[in-house]
Image (spheres, helix red, strand yellow):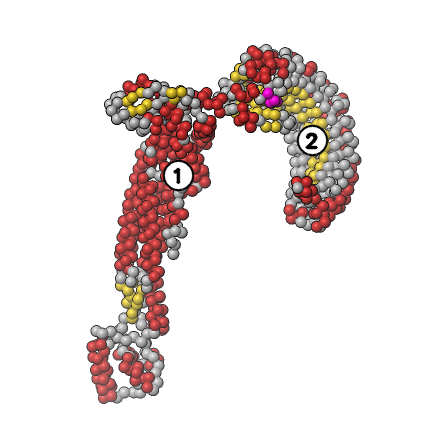
């Protein structure tokens, strides 16, 4: 049997969730506890008390079944016990008339003898009838009574009498689980937890009270007229009462407050205050949390649906319990008749039983039904409340009327439902919470606290080292640029993201080390002195925009700029706009990176083409048609045209005699017959044709003699031609994720090969010639059909990375131990295959761990 402590966790909801539990939920929780106590009490009593007590029903002296037994045998008479000698006399005194004829089973009786015997039996029957009022002896053993009690408990007693306590317990547990399921289900529990946390901070934060009292004087005259009107007001406005005070306001630099007496309000002169650092940080964090939480919750109505479903389940459960319980309540009875069909063991056919717990169980059942009825009516009221008003919409109209913030938006879906639930607890919560939905309130707070919050020390903590080992500061979604930023004179990189009101003052001239600036959706305005500094000192500029018109005009006048990164919409209509002020003033520009949706290379790029050494164009899938401008970029050494929907290698590329690195990733190239023209590009060392639709490699690739790196991964290659292996300078070959089934034996000709990637193909056999490439450092063979690794792999003494995961290997060669530079961190293989290596080989592969540990010590 369950104890109350064991099931208490079913109803163990965090105390902070109480603000989301209206009165009906609290009431139902207590009803469930009472029902649980009734179930446990009934179950405990049923276990500790005797279940049923049964006695046999003795047959009467005159029985129609006795007549046939007069001439029968003793063995055929029911209830007769075989006796001999003196035991027969005893049996005659205790047997009923039904057994009397069995005294002389095989001796024929004369008429006189039979008459005499009948007279004797009649006298005995009269004596027995006199004894019936006092009961008759049954000669049943104690074990037989126990046996028949158990039999009749299961046969005669109605099932509801036996299982009512357990059913009540199960029903109550189901109701308790249903009541609190939305607090436990992960998809809703996480949102509820965040909401309660944010709501509590908004209500209890010291800054909230201070901010409300500071902004209470904004409409002092209007408030005075309203406050001195017909309704009486509380004494302290700073706590934002329900009706009388402006409960939704934002903090101002000047602090003002009202003190009211019970009869007449007295206005005091506001005093100047400054929000302390802790309160300002807390308020800003709350605005950010509320915004993110709203975006996260307002898009769905899962919480509302789950609450409705669990309420419907409780209502259906109540109807079900009430229906079948009402039918069985009258079956709980004190007396029961039992016919267990065990006459051959006991000697009696029918028994009369008493159920000791019947009276108490019936009372408990009636009490349980009463509780269920009350529970059900509360469920019906809950359903009425759920569908009476649109709970997926919540309006702050009243708050907007009482405060100076008219931009508090109405909310919907789960966000609205949670606020409706909070209103059932206390409407003051949602009123205060509405302040943090106002953009005006947020902007005022930011204007006041920006410089106070972002001190020099705090900004210094946000400075980090980027991948180029430069000091970088990233400011994200601020109301402006803090003044303390320009005191970081040793800063190399400044990133400003989503700061619509960014202004760069003359103080930036102090940042003598600043050479890289990022403007991400940040149309920054600069002062004249600041522009002069940026024009002379800035070397790298990243501009991310939605429309090209958002690019600040001063960008095109940075004559000493070396690198320019433009990320945004540059469609055909706006291509002309990129020419405003043009790029011709950028005389020292070397790297131009454009990530957009171009249909042609902008003609104004040709203004700086002679100076460019690297051009990168990343399209979003828009087909790049016109490429003739590329012919003018004679100094370009690196060219990337990614995701431009190219179907062939553009002919304009073959004019770039200084080209060293060509990347045509993520296009629609099917054939590369034009690769023969690369023989004129004597400096071309790296060719990247990955993520295309190339089916085969033409033999003419052998004419590109100076090629050192060839990337052909994620294509549709089925074989590697011999021509590839004639590229003697090749150091890196990547043909991963194709359909290659065989590695040609000519691979052994690549004596300078250092990196080979064949992951994700259909290779099943490794040629021995592969291991003649003794300079191999990286060998990726994962996700193939390889069944064994030759022992000659030990010849790759410079191997540092070996990938074998995803093959059909059953063991690893012990010769891996001869790869002196290979360590376990560079061996990508299943754990069970690693365990097949000899212990001495595993020790060799694990050396790096011990060495690192020793160095750490």
| Secondary structure that dominates the magenta span | loop
Query: Which residue is drawn at the image coordinates 36% and 73% (left, top)?
Result: 345
Asked if the stretch drawn in magenta spans residue 705, the answer is no
Q: CA distance from mark 2 to mark 1?
A: 58 Å
Label 1 belongs to which residue? Answer: 16
Q: Which mark is residue 242?
A: none
Q: Residues within 10 Å of mark 1 (few under 14, many from 20)?
A: few
Q: Residue 119 location in percent, x, y? A: 21, 84
Question: Is the C-beta separation of discs 2 and 1 under 8 Å?
Answer: no
Q: Residue 790 location in percent, x, y? A: 74, 45
Query: Above or below — where is 113 with respect to 137?
Result: below
Q: Residue 664 location in percent, x, y? A: 66, 26
Query: Which residue is drawn at the image coordinates 40% and 41% (left, top)?
Result: 14
Label 2 belongs to which residue? Answer: 711
- Give the structural element (helix, strand or loop) at label 2: strand
User: Between 815 and 98, which is closer to the camera in this rendering?
Assistant: 815
- Give the structural element (helix, strand or loop) at label 1: helix
Q: Which residues are magenta?
A: 489-493
Q: Quadrant of the C terminus?
A: top right
Q: Residue 199 location in percent, x, y? A: 40, 33
Instruction: Report which quarter residue 527 is drawn in.
Output: top right
Residue 291 visible from this viewpoint: no
Q: Is residue 683 left or right of residue 227?
A: right
Query: Which residue is drawn at the image coordinates 60% and 14% (left, top)?
Result: 533
Q: Residues within 10 Å of mark 2 (few under 14, many from 20)?
A: some
Q: Nearer the viewer, mark 2 or mark 1?
A: 1
User: Between 837 and 70, which is closer to the camera in this rendering?
Assistant: 837
Query: Which residue is drawn at the image coordinates 67% and 33% (left, top)?
Result: 713
Instruction: Report which quarter residue 401 is drawn in.
Output: top left
Q: Quadrant of the N terminus?
A: bottom left
């Amino acid at each position: 049997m369950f104890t109350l402590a064991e099931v208490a966790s079913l109803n163990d909801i965090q105390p902070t969730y109480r603000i989301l539990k209206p009165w009906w939920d609290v009431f139902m929780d207590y009803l469930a506890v009472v029902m649980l106590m009734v179930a446990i009490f009934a179950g405990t009593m049923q276990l500790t008390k005797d279940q049923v007590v049964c006695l046999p029903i003795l047959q009467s002296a005159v029985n129609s079944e006795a007549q046939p037994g007069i001439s029968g045998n003793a063995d055929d008479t029911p209830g007769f016990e075989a006796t001999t000698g003196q035991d027969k006399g005893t049996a005659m005194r205790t047997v009923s008339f039904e057994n009397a004829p069995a005294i002389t089973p095989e001796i024929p009786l004369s008429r006189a003898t039979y008459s005499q015997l009948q007279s004797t039996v009649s006298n005995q029957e009269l004596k027995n009838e006199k004894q019936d009022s006092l009961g008759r002896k049954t000669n049943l053993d104690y074990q037989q009574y126990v046996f028949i009690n158990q039999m009749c408990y299961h046969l005669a007693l109605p099932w509801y009498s036996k299982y009512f306590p357990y059913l009540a317990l199960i029903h109550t547990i189901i109701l308790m689980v249903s009541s609190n399921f939305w607090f436990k289900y992960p998809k809703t529990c996480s949102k509820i937890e965040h909401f309660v946390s944010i709501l509590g901070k908004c209500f209890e934060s010291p800054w909230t009270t201070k901010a409300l009292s500071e902004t209470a004087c904004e409409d002092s005259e209007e408030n005075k007229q309203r406050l001195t009107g017909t309704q009486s007001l509380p004494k302290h406005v700073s706590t934002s009462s329900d009706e009388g005070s402006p409960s939704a306001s934002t903090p101002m630099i000047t602090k003002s407050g009202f003190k009211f007496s019970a009869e007449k309000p007295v206005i005091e002169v506001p005093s100047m205050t400054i929000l302390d650092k802790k309160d300002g940080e807390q308020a800003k964090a709350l605005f950010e949390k509320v915004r993110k939480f709203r975006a996260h919750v307002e898009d769905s109505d899962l919480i509302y649906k789950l609450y409705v479903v669990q309420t419907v389940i409780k209502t259906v459960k109540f109807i079900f319990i009430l229906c079948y319980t009402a039918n069985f309540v009258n079956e709980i009875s004190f007396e029961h008749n039992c016919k267990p069909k065990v006459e051959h063991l006991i000697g009696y056919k029918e028994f009369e039983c008493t159920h000791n717990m019947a009276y108490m169980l019936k009372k408990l059942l009636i009490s349980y039904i009463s509780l269920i009825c009350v529970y059900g009516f509360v469920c019906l009221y809950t359903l009425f409340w759920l569908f009476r008003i649109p709970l997926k919409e919540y309006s702050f109209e009243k708050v907007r009327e009482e405060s100076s913030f008219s931009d508090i938006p109405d909310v919907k879906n789960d966000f609205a439902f949670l606020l409706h639930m909070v209103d059932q607890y206390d409407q003051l919560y949602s009123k205060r919470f509405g302040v943090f939905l106002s953009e005006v309130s947020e902007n005022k707070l930011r204007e006041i606290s920006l410089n106070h919050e972002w001190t020099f020390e705090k900004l210094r903590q946000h400075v980090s080292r980027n991948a180029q080992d430069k000091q970088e500061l990233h400011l994200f979604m601020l109301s402006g640029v803090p003044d303390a930023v320009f005191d970081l004179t040793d800063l190399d990189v400044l990133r400003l993201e989503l700061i619509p009101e960014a202004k760069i003052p003359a103080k930036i001239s102090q940042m003598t080390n600043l050479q890289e600036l990022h403007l991400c959706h940040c149309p920054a305005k600069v002062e004249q002195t600041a522009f002069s500094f940026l024009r002379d000192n800035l070397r790298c500029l990243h501009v991310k925009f939605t429309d090209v018109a958002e690019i600040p005009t001063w960008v095109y006048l940075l004559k000493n700029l070396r690198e320019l990164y433009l990320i945004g919409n540059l469609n055909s209509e706006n291509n002309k706009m990129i020419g405003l002020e043009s790029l011709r003033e950028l005389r020292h520009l070397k790297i131009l990176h454009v990530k957009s949706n171009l249909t042609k290379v902008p003609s104004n790029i040709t203004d700086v083409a002679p100076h460019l050494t690297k051009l990168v164009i990343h399209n979003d899938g828009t087909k790049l048609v016109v490429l003739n401008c590329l012919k003018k970029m004679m100094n370009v050494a690196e060219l990337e045209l990614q995701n431009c929907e190219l179907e062939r290698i553009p002919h304009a590329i073959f004019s770039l005699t200084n080209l060293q690195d060509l990347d045509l990733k993520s296009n629609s190239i099917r054939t590369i017959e034009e690769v023969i023209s690369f023989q004129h590009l004597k400096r071309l060392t790296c060719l990247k044709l990955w993520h295309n639709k190339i089916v085969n490699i033409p033999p003419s690739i052998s004419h590109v003699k100076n090629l050192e790196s060839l990337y052909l991964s994620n294509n549709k290659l089925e074989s590697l031609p011999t021509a590839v292996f004639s590229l003697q300078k090749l150091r890196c070959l990547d043909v991963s994720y194709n359909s290659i089934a065989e590695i040609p034996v000519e691979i052994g000709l690549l004596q300078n090969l250092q990196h080979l990637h064949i992951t994700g193909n259909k290779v099943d056999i490794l040629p021995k010639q592969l291991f003649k490439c003794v300079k191999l450092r990286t060998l990726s063979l994962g996700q193939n059909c390889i069944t064994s690794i030759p022992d000659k792999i030990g010849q790759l003494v410079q191997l540092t990375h070996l990938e074998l995961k995803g093959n059909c290997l059953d063991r690893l060669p012990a010769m891996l131990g001869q790869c002196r530079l290979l360590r376990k961190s560079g061996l990508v293989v299943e754990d069970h295959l690693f365990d097949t290596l000899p212990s001495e080989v595993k020790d060799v592969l694990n050396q790096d761990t011990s060495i690192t540990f020793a160095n750490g010590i």
